[in-house]
Image (tube, rainbow, N blue to C red):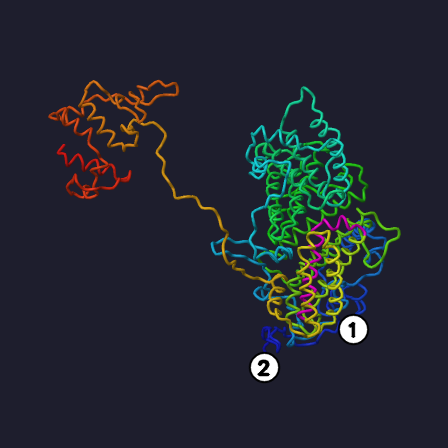
Amino acid sequence: MAPTRTAEKDTPAADGETKQRRKPGRAPVSCAECRRLKLRCDRKVPCETCVKRGCSALCPDGSLPTMKGPRKAAADAEQLKKRVKELEAALKTLQETVSDEPHPLLGGEPTAAPPAVPESITEASPPASSSNSNGSASQGGDEYELDPDVLDAFGTLTLGSRGEARFFGQTARSEYLLHAPERIVAYETLNLPRLTNITIDEAYKDLDMFCTSDDVGEEAMTCLPPITKALHLCDIFFTYSKFLWYPVSREYIVDDLIPSIYHPTEVAYCHVTKKHGLSLLLMIFALATLFDPDMPPYAAEAHEFYLLARVSLRWAPPAYDTTLASIQALIYMSIYLEMSDCEPAHTGSHKAWMQIRYATSMGQSIGLHLCSARWRLDDAAQAKRARVFWQLATYDAWLSFGYGRPPSISLEYVDSEVPKVEDAIVNDESPEDASYFVWSWQFTKMLHTIMASAFGAKQPTYAKIIELDRRVRDFPVPPALRLVCGVSETPPAPAHLSMQRLLVTMTKEMTLLNLHRPYFSLAVKDASEDPLRHKFGPSVMAVYRSAWRILTTVHNAYTAAPGIVGRYGLVWSYSLACAILLCLLIARASSSPLAGPCFVELEKVCKLFEEAASQCQFASNNIDVIRKLRKQAQSAMTSVRAEDDVAIASELDRLGGKTQLIKIIGERQLFCHSKAVFAPSSRSSGLEVSNLSGAYVQPLVAQDMRTFYQMADPGVGTNGLANGNGNVNGVANGNGLTNATANAPYNGSFMSGAYPDLSQADVATLMNFDLSAMWDPSVSQGGSLQGTAEYTQPNPADSEATWRALVQQLGI
């Protein structure tokens, strides 16, 4: 009998995968694609035919889907070629704006896929080996995965004994973390000789409250500087506006605003725009005075201008009438609070963070986050609104980033485009100067994505961190703003260009430093011998390089412009953060190849702080911290254990971003008022009367007294009672006349029906009865009255029950 052909079955292979069973008979010798096209196959893998056709990956078992015909394939190929040419042209145009070298993809030869880890942070990092005791990465697809519980970097939470709390997130600035255990003290008013206490109190009130004091207004106008000094301060403001803050129109300030305030016409009248413009002008004076080289740092006069600007804004609160000038003034107020913050507790910076959120709310209330073309505004108005909004978005993002807190603006609700370079020019700036602000606004858009992806409640994978790192490093920088570290420029660049390059460098490098900081801390902790061999070794190299670039740029900028850098606290804040991370690497991995270079950079930072401490308040406040970091690094390098080594090591972990709860001992001493005292109502009521001594009488007692008076003289109504001042027929009005119609007259029906046998003598006895001398608490419980005993004065709450008991004892 011929064998029966059975159905094909899939048999399990040794590796767990299913292996299709071949049909019995002659096995094919040609590949599947050659059989489909009926071509001759050379029986190689891959065969020559598949290699020529570009489908070698499918050989020998795979095949392409069958097309309808050669004409369809040719048409698709031509369309794809046209699309490739368009993309190459666009890439070439974009590459010319950021670099003089051609893009690697336009070289004509196919390029390899980009590496998974950025080359700039891995060229000094050896390849990872298999898992071992020092925490090196294991080979496989999960080398970038990490348990969220392992990455302990959610920031610091302070909790007081009375429930007061404060949170500093993962990206919080180092000086905030240093003073996190301290309480934010109430703002200590400086010595402001030109302002009275009334004006200062008005200035510190909420901005949504109207200020109606004429004396404060007159004082504010007398504190304005002479017009020559005002113009000088405006020149300083516009000089520093090339890099420290975005300017307003010089034509609007000099030609419109100053003449309307200093030389008002006779027909001029006050309106919302003028009040908001005055607040804006005073903030310009405040910022200019803060950086005036002829004035001492943190001059009191600058704070006077700031307080007067708040008062001017309260004359027309922006919560009721919102204008672009008021929002611009709020932005400058936030900048001033952050830049003038020189106290250790950093109260000003915290107020700046709250101030910019208020300004952001005002901006959203007038639709700045939406494209103004929807309402068919002219091009100038659209550009102006877009410039104001992206100032709000930038300062809100960076102040929130500095505290490790989420920004108040979500780009999901924003379709306002970043202004172009030509739209960002408001005065006589060059396109290069305007490109700095456009670049910072564009970088802010990417920063929002980074904050949501890397610093949210859910920890990302390490592969996501590397992807974000690549985006930051590939973010194009205009040629004029590029800085090559270690190379001196001849001739030296202007001061404003040096500051622009410094801020661009710090913006990118601090983003990278915070992006890698938690993984850096974990690597130096787990692989102390050589953290570069840890699976997070790229983060160690990234942090070291970012710190080196920041410190080198700060040193060069301070050498070129010490007067500007010395008054700009943000520069020293980032330098302090770099010093802490360098000390952390030395303390945790003193035998690492990077420990020596880190110690050299730490020495440079310490010398820089000591040199600037005489003219920089921030450096003076933190010079002891820098010296302590150097001492800790020296003890780690020399293997000499310091006395407070354990405490310093724990503090370094917290400053490095480790999650920690700090319980504050003690509490703030506040003034307590006396216990609550319930005053009688001042409203006149038909049930309220005054007794002969002017004391307050309960309503039920008043009703009974009306009854007894009606018994004594039926012709007398309720208005016959004498008040506490001896006036009859009610309460005297403001003219000394009595008000006989305060209460409706009593008709006497209740009296005649309830007490028909009461004599005039009984009424006289009742009216002369002394309640205060005969009151006894036992009366309310059924006891008897004893006239010879001494009794206490009753509480007002017990008077009604006392009166009832008295009436019962008298047998009425």
Relative image position of residue 498 (x, y in whole percent) = 80, 50
The numbered mark at residue 743 is none
The residue beneath circle 2 is: 1
Q: In the image, what residue type sits under mark 1?
A: Lys
* In the depicted structure, whether residue 115 falls above or below residue 90: below
Dividing the image into 4 quarters, which one contains the C terminus?
A: top left
Residue 11 falls in which quadrant of the image? bottom right
Relative image position of residue 172 (x, y in whole percent) = 63, 55
Query: Which one is nearer the viewer's eye here, 743 or 22?
Result: 743
Q: Are discs 1 and 2 less than 8 Å apart at CB? A: no
* In the depicted structure, whether residue 419 falls above or below residue 476: above
Query: Which one is nearer the viewer's eye here, 567 or 65?
Result: 567
The label nearer to you, 1 versus 2, is: 1
The residue beneath circle 1 is: 44
Q: Which callout, 1 or 2, points at the residue further toward the start of the chain?
A: 2
Q: Which residues are magenta?
A: 560-588
Q: CA distance from mark 1 to mark 2?
A: 40 Å
